[in-house]
């Protein structure tokens, strides 16, 4: 059973609780747990239910074919109709136990959940929201300072080791703190700060069946291993790839100005393999974020940026996108593909003159940024967008945001054939603009 955690319960002292078996409502409960699969939709004439894909509808109901009686519920008024079995919670809830007097005792450490984290009799489904997880007992506070300096008890609270707290958004304030926007207020506020070494950011599972991962072929003082996870995290955050992606990383030496070279991707079954080699002449001079940025760039190509589907999206003589492409992503009317600099750069990057320093231009820069359209265009290459980028954002900022994020796809990774290998030609050489 679940209930509002004590410190988040506006009706403290009232033993609000919920029995999962018989779905009885008690105390200050505002929700029931769904007994089956539910989807969002809207209410039509005479109150039939119409499921709508990818819309925050005004109601939830069983999917059509499961629910033949058009059962529905209004979330705002919590009015029950006909065969309704669930109302979505309006506040966070936690697991716990109830005694014979109907008093609720939350599990410690507790995990905050919502109704769509459960199916049937309480079986775990999947997280549909972001959360932070405490690695140790940690203090969540109103200011990014030492919690011992905060004397007002309403301006801090403890998150026990193993506990999770739902968040809508997180931003890196400094090297030691996350700024959090909570899903529900605590002590009247949704803005809090967490000491980043004490927590992990856990992103929602979005029915992922594929993953972007890496394999180290050879390294230079562990630099590639330290940055490979950052690069994979970047794309795993924004994209669910059509196939599994394995990025193989290695080194080479050249006295010239090539800092890295990428090889043409190849595929076996449901896995696409890409290979990137870094010039050891420059590898030690770049920060981890700089190296990760180069890997992120090359993963973008492995995802299709510059290959067959991409080439059909624009006019090669001008670099302008075709009307049918712009109709799908209107922002592309302002974008142009590079048509200069020869093979490996032309037709496979954003235009350097117009979009200098963008992630997917053809030259490496000290400062780089990412445009929202760089993420959106991945949908035209056959991938699912897991999260859209809201605005033009510094690449290092985005990398910092996901360096503590966990993408747990153990079973999928175990099914990948890491032994399969094929020699392919070099598809791109990245040159430094710093020498």
Image (cartoon, rainbow, N blue to C red):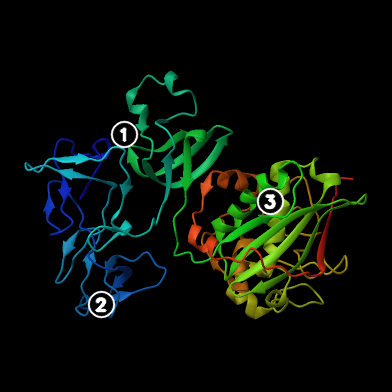
Who comes first in sequence, dot 3 or dot 2? 2
| Residue wearing tag 1 | 187
Work out how far the residue at label 2 is from the one at label 1, CA to CA, in angstroms: 41 Å
Q: Residue at x 76, y 64 (%)?
A: 349
What's the mark number on residue 369?
Answer: 3
Location of residue 3 in the rendering, given as x and y in whole percent from the top left corner = 22, 46
| Residue wearing tag 2 | 66
> Considering only vertical position in the picture, is 282 above or below 195?
below
> Considering only vertical position in the picture, is 89 above or below 345?
above
Give the residue at the far right of this rendering: 255
Location of residue 104 in the rendering, given as x and y in whole percent from the top left corner = 16, 41
Work out how far the residue at label 3 is from the one at label 1, CA to CA, in angstroms: 37 Å
Who comes first in sequence, dot 2 or dot 1? 2
**Mark closer to the observer (3, 2):** 2
Would you say 323 lies left or right of 403 here?
right
Who comes first in sequence, dot 3 or dot 1? 1
Determine which quarter of the picture holds residue 20. bottom left
Do tag 2 and tag 1 residues touch (Cβ < 8 Å)? no
Which SS class for mark 2?
loop
Work out how far the residue at label 3 is from the one at label 2, CA to CA, in angstroms: 46 Å
Q: Residue at x 73, y 41 (%)?
A: 287
Location of residue 246 in the rendering, given as x and y in whole percent from the top left corner = 64, 62
Give the residue at the far front of this rendering: 419
- For the question of whether residue 286 can be seen, the reply is yes
Which SS class for mark 3?
strand
Q: Residue at x 73, y 48 (%)?
A: 291
What's the mark number on residue 201?
Answer: none
Q: How many marks?
A: 3
| Mark 3 neighbour class, 10 Å CA radius: few under 14, some 14 to 19, many 20 or more | some
């Amino acid at each position: 059973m679940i209930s509002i955690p004590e410190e988040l319960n506006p009706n403290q002292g009232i033993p609000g609780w919920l029995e999962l078996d018989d779905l009885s409502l008690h105390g200050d409960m505002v929700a029931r747990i769904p007994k089956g699969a539910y989807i969002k939709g809207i209410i039509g004439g005479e109150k039939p239910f119409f499921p709508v894909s990818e819309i925050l509808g005004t109601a939830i109901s069983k999917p059509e074919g499961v629910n033949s009686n058009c059962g529905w519920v209004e979330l705002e008024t919590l009015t029950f109709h006909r065969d309704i079995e669930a109302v979505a919670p309006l506040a966070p809830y936690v697991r716990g136990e109830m005694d014979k007097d109907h008093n609720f005792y939350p599990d410690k450490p507790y995990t905050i959940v919502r109704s769509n984290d459960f199916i049937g009799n309480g079986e775990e489904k999947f997280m549909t929201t972001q959360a932070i997880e405490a690695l140790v007992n940690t203090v969540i506070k109103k200011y990014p300072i030492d919690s011992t300096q905060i004397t007002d008890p309403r301006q801090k609270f403890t998150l026990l080791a193993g506990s999770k707290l739902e968040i809508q958004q997180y931003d890196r304030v400094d090297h030691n703190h996350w700024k959090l926007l909570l899903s529900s207020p605590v002590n009247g506020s949704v803005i809090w700060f967490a000491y980043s070494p004490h927590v992990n950011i856990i992103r929602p599972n979005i029915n992922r069946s594929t993953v972007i991962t890496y394999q180290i072929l050879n390294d230079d003082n562990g630099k590639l291993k330290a940055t490979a996870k950052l690069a994979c995290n970047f794309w795993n955050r924004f994209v669910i790839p059509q196939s599994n992606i394995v990025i193989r990383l290695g080194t080479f030496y050249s006295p010239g100005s090539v800092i890295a070279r990428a090889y043409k991707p190849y595929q076996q079954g449901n896995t696409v393999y890409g290979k990137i080699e870094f010039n050891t002449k420059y590898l030690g001079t770049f920060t981890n974020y700089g190296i990760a940025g180069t890997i992120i760039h090359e993963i973008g190509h492995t995802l299709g940026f510059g290959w067959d589907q991409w080439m059909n999206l624009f006019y090669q003589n001008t670099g302008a996108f075709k009307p049918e492409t712009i109709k799908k992503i209107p922002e592309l009317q302002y974008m142009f593909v590079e048509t200069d600099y020869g093979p490996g750069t032309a037709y496979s990057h954003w235009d350097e003159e117009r979009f200098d320093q963008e992630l997917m231009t053809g030259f490496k820069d000290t400062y780089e940024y990412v445009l929202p359209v760089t993420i959106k265009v991945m949908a035209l290459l056959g991938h699912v967008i897991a999260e859209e980028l809201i605005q033009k954002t510094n690449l290092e900022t985005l990398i910092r945001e996901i360096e503590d994020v966990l993408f747990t796809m153990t079973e999928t990774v175990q099914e990948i054939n890491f032994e399969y290998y094929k020699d392919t030609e070099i598809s791109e050489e990245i040159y430094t603009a710093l020498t």
